Amino acid sequence: MLRLPPFDVATPATVAEVVRALEATPDARILAGGTDLLPNLKHRLERPPALISLARVTALRQVIDKDDDNAVRIGAGVSLSTLSTHPLVRGAFPSLCEAAERVASPIIRNMATLGGNVHLDTRCRYVNQTQFWRQGIGGCLKAEGDVCHVVPKGRNCVAALSSDCVPVIVALDGSIELVGPEGQRTIPAEAYFRADGLRHTVRVSNEVMTALILRKPAAYRRERYLKWTVRKSIDFPLLSVAMRFDLETEAPDAPVTAVRIVVGVLGAKPRLVGKLNAAIGMRFSDPKVADMISQAVHSQCRPLENIPYDAAYRRRMLQVYTHRAIQAMATQAATSPSQPGRR
Amino acid sequence: MATRSPTTKSAQAQAAAGGTTKAWQIGRSHRKVDAMDRMRGVARYTDDLKLPGMLHAKIMRSPHAHANIKGIDTSRALNLEGVFAVVTGQDFKIPYGVIPWTPDENALAVNKVCHVGDGIAAVAATDEDTAIEAVNRIDVDYELLKAYFDPEEALMEGALQINPHAKRGNLSKNLILEFGDAARAVQNSQLVIEGDYFFCGTTHAALEPHCAVAQVDPNGLLTVWSATQVSHYLHRELAKVLELPAHKIRVIQPPLGGAFGGKSEPFDLEFCVAKLALITGRPVKLLYTREEVFYSHRGRHPMKMRYRTGFSREGKIQGVEARTIIDGGAYSSFGLVTTYYSGQLLCAPYDFPAYRFHSTRVYTNKPACGPKRGHGSVQPRFALEVQLDKAAVKLGIDPIDLRRRNDLGSHSTTINEFRIGSNGFLACLEAVERASQWKQRRAQLRYGCGLGVAGSTYISGTNYPIYPNDMPQAAVQICIDRSGRVRVFSGANDIGQGSDTMLAVITAQELGVELDDIRVLSADTDLCPVDLGAYSSRITLMVGNACLDAAHKLRKKVCAAVAKRWEIPATRITLVQRKAMDIEDPSHHIAIAEAFSWAEADHGLLGEVGSYNTPKEERHGTYRGGTIGASPAYSFTAHVAEVGVDEDTGVVEVKKIWVAHDCGRALSRKIVEGQMEGSVYMGFAEALFESHEVDPEHGGVHRGPSLLDYRLPTFADTPPIESLIIEAPDANGPYGAKEAGEGPLHPCIPAIANAIYDAVGIRMDHMPFDPPSVLAALDTRRASDMAGTTTRHPRPTGSATGPGRPA
Amino acid sequence: MSHGPVLSFELNGEPITTTVPAHWTLLELLRYRLDLIGSKQGCDKGDCGACTVQLDGEPVLACLTLAATTQGRSVTTVEGLGYQRGACHPLQDAFDRFDAAQCGFCTPGILLSAEALLRKQARAVSREEVRAALAGNLCRCTGYTKIIDAVVDCGERLYGPPVTEAAPTD
């Protein structure tokens, strides 16, 4: 069987203890659900001296309605199973539930956490293999080598962001709350991710993510997470698109006031699709909205051969599935804007 | 109470006995004799064995696809604390091979490696971590060689020879067989269908990884526990390679976690644990990683096939010509047989007036291919059944009717001279036609939805064993005693298919006991009679017959003992419902244990052996190779698949599969259905999801040797399957039974391909039918629609245009 | 090799204290130290579900759970699923009646996923619900059909027939 490399395990009970442990062992890794980290360790992608388990940090498992701030604070340790069915989250941010619900398999969602999904390491067909396998290709930028097998002569690792939740979090303008030795900081999700497959977030290694902060919608909203995989379970996304439309009213033909489309599984960073201003003011139900946006997604997003599926096909499907998803959104109910102070 | 006439009594006894043979056990559903142990986590599979002082072994494997080994330095590994021994190819110089004519592999590489993952050295250490560390300390000096991943390139003049034992360069086997003048028959046909087909390789992916444990007794007896489906062949090859007499080796197959052909020959780990145990004197275990399972492979061969089939205007096949290139990988495995099967098993259920096939198996620098469920014949069956569908469209004949018109019939002889006994193919066709409401629904389905049909046949074991001998092909020993308990000893390997239960059902039927009264002890070469193993769907027919033979003999003794005491003819005694009973007076009975004790008193300890050998007369042709593919009985299958094709994405959704299978006689219904459902699942998975490939651009590494990247369909992906058991009893099978474990897979892939055509008018002649390939075919069809060159659409296209479609 | 730090947790309803190296998974601890061999290892790394056990009542993958992180928690394996004194769980009985286990290698994991489904729903379940709940457990033998049959049947036997006739999903 594939074995884990030797390491020590710490099981602190509070966030402060986690931070102290991170400081004490600089190369330690944070262990949440383990469904990403442990396979990567079995593959010898890293050899940390210690793992700092969050299993006992119950404070990270809360979902709090921060009514005063008109926001919801979701603890980083909330499991994806809990997240996908949480009534508060489902009511205000249904696409986040949708994303959580589509991660891997039911068993993995019981283990995996929101924080873990945000920090899911970038993935590549030439990386997420055993050490023996990588020996056969001589390694790559991300492991044991200095070449890129995806982009010949490339110097920047393009391993793919494969989190289902991240595109949604960016689309919803969420913020990541971190705690480190210097205290707490909150970073907008849009600025949290970097285009570098080796280190794809701005978190520094002695910080721990404590929560995701989502501002409650200020407008009527239609949102959706689109995922396509070969199998209906277990697989990482091959197509991943988060969509959010802010509308004047709850009617399907209401004018669009804002739109954010975020695409995953391209390079290391989620791609915020630009040049969508033409959609502002158009009626949501106008077929031109779906046409225009799906074309923009197609022209701005170029999937790579970094994950094991035909890139040209994935690019073409980005357009098809985005178009379909927007059309389908017209038939589902809109989320209402929150009314501060009222529960 | 009124007095009953003897005839009424007899009828009642018959009823009580369920018609004596009928309802007592045969044909019912049963709880499997070993299932509860497996479900409670009590059954010990190979990796569940733990022996005192056991060492753990690991194999060092080649990261290169083709290289000479200039030197191996194991000293750094041997110096590591906790390492007990290291072996290399120099310790296993005798080559072996499951087919005696092609011994072309060594337990570990001798002087060269032939594919990524080839074993080079093995280490035994106190624990797995130490063994892994030791493997990393083995230094190998390689001389890299050009590697060949395409069989046609490997055959070119000047290509380096891959397998050092090969006799004809990279040609593994070349075979031409012709029956009648096929070329002329096709040429003279009113319709000729010509097609090129490609079947990608697929692998078994049984959930239990291969594992073996070895132990040597102080008296020198070597015991090897292995997750194998062919204990006997493993036993033979261990004796050969280790140069030990066979009686000094005991092979035990613990409960097995699936096989599907992937555990049907010896593997490097079995030789390594044995040798390491002999060297260290300690028990040694080796468990493959999932990646190692992929590199060990022996899965379905990729085949490139060219078919020419001639038809009459009425849809009758006139002749078939086939040219097949078989990508064998680095070793022969069962390849000699595969090459024959690629042509020989195609001659039923349809009557071929003339047939010629030319098959060529080639060595390449890939993991070796071998037998996977439906060995050798699933690939050509795909090609032929699509050919038939193309002809049906051209001729305007319903595809089911076209198949009926070509039915070979029962008690017939194929063009290649195989003798067919019972044949329920027409009933299979009718069953799937009715259950799927083929006629009504096919006419009404909208564009994008389609129904497809295909048929097939398969063998119930091979008429001749892998190594020529005159001994029986199967043997069973049964003992009974005064407790009423029955013990069945059989060498057959239960690999999850339920063969232990099959033996219990036959024994219970004959001796009148319940399955609970029976202990089946199987697949232990010290305790059980020799059996050739779980391959070629041989066990129900062959081992079942041997079991029936032994049980019959015991039944006779027990009936005689009872008859003697009751002073009535033995023919009046029946054994049923844990009783010995007078057929003419069912109220007259005794407990079976008492009957057994009477027999024990008369005969001493009650044990009988039964044997089975195949009928040899007029079963096959006398031409060279004419015996390969001959079987005592043939099963028949038909599938109808219903699909939906998304024309913007190329995604094929299989909505339902109906499978009708003629198994001769279902000895245990739910087990037969389970084999049918599992077969359909596996075929469906191959059609749409799976492809076992190496990456030629990256030195021949496997494209995704994990259960993440090699995508087995999940609960959520697998369509509903409706199993329809057809029973055309065969005189050669026990109670008429034939096989059910492999045949039901065959039609699945072409039925799906034909349904895709029915849905959207594209021919998927290359596998798998993944969304990019389907979409590309749709693009081509749309381009030809535009150009007005599309010949015929099964259904009018009526859907709106969407994005992603060419303008 | 060091036997590692001390670990205490509840295993199949009984407290247990053992030692385990820090880098051992729960699966390794169960199989190779505690000799509870019912949880199987099929894929090395969380792709197959054969090692599914319950942690505090939720199905999890033992091959991706560090043994050390189960401190103070409750683990249920297939060995703890059966009722006391040799009887079996109704799901095991249903699997037996439907011949839903062929090689049986995936079965322990599937039983633990299915048990969690039935316990949480506490009512008869539909075929579609079974498919969704078991979608992380691979089976290579059965084509899943008989497993779904068995779980649906077991739900009905435990909780009575479905309240409203579910639309046929097949």
Image (cartoon, coloured by chain):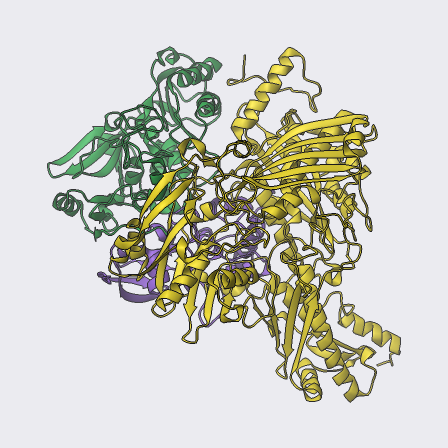
Answer yes or no: is residue B509 visible.
yes
- x, y percent for residue B773: 54, 27
The percent position of residue A126, horizontal first and vertical second, equals 36, 34
Name the residue located 53 percent from the left edge and 25 percent from the top edge: B649
Q: How many marks?
A: 0
Q: Is residue B650 visible?
A: no
Decide if residue C153 is on the left or right side of residue C5.
Answer: right
Task: Tell which residue pokes out farthest to the left in this image.
Answer: A182
Is B59 displayed left or right of A64 in the figure?
Answer: right
Does B644 appear above or below B58? above
Task: Looking at the picture, tell me which residue is in the foreground, B560 or A118.
Answer: B560
Residue A192 lies in what quarter of the image?
Answer: top left
| Left or right of B321, for residue B326 | left
Q: Quadrant of residue C21?
A: bottom left
- The colour with which the image depicts chain A is green
- Residue A123 locus on image (x, y percent): 34, 34
Return the residue nearer the eye: A13 or B43: B43
Residue C152 image offset from top left, x and y in percent: 55, 52
For the point 82% across and 88% down, the residue is B567
Pick the residue in front: A62 or A70.
Answer: A62
The residue lying toward the viewer, choosing from A337 and C166, is: C166
In the picture, the quarter occupied by the C terminus of chain B is: top right
Q: At 37% across and 61% down in the image, what residue appears?
A: C31
The answer to whether B225 is drawn above or below residue A253 in the figure is below
Q: Colour of chain C?
A: purple
Q: Which chain appears yellow?
A: B
